[in-house]
Amino acid sequence: MIALGSDHGGYELKQEIIAYLKEKNLDFKDYGTDSKDSCDYPVYAKKVANAIVAGECDKGILICGTGIGISITANKIKGIRAALCHDTFSAQATREHNDANILAMGARVVGPGLALKIVDTFLNTDFSNDERHIRRIEQME
Ligand code: RB5
């Protein structure tokens, strides 16, 4: 199950991602926001992060205008490794090396075409399970 969250700045891109996940028959839960009305990104970052920590969802996707505020907030929650990615190389590397459990993006930074490629890469790349990467992740915690 994939947890989705955005503020108003990320709302439209989140709708594109929802359409993409539906097309791929992937299960998701949308934790809001539900419109383009101005709202506070920490609310949605925390909802998605808590859903992952609670085991309700395996991975999350968070979107705000830049992806910065929403990823900073998510990373304050223990057990969350939120990676801000605006290219597919980073999305692949953060899954393989960091076992990132949240992908963050900025809707004012990437267009929807690239964003969907990044989502696809993030969701379809497994953690390497390499001993040195496991060790480094343990050091983060
Ligand atoms: C909202 O205007 C904007 O600040 C937010 O979407 C995000 O970019 C914050 O980091």
Image (tube, rainbow, N blue to C red):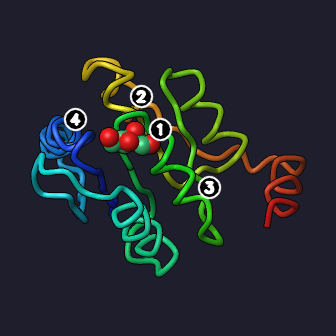
Amino acid bearing label 1: Phe
Q: CA distance from mark 2 to mark 4?
A: 13 Å
Residue highlighted by disc 3: 81
Q: Residue at x 28, y 51 (%)?
A: 7
Residue 90 position within the rendered picture, expressed as x and y whole percent measured from the top left: 60, 27
Mark 2 and ligand 1: say if the CB distance to the nearest ligand atom is below 8 Å: no
Q: Residue at x 63, y 38 (%)?
A: 94
Residues at circles 2 and 3 in contact by the CB criterion of under 8 Å: no
Of the two numbered discs 2 and 3 on the same chain, state the one appearing first in sequence.
Answer: 3
What is the residue that sits farthest to the bottom in this orientation?
54
Q: CA distance from mark 4 to mark 3?
A: 21 Å
Residues at circles 2 and 1 in contact by the CB criterion of under 8 Å: yes
Task: Give the numbered dot on residue 118.
Answer: 2
Amino acid bearing label 4: Leu
Say which of marks 2 and 3 sits in front: 3
Measured along the vertical axis of the image, is residue 43 above or below residue 55?
Answer: above
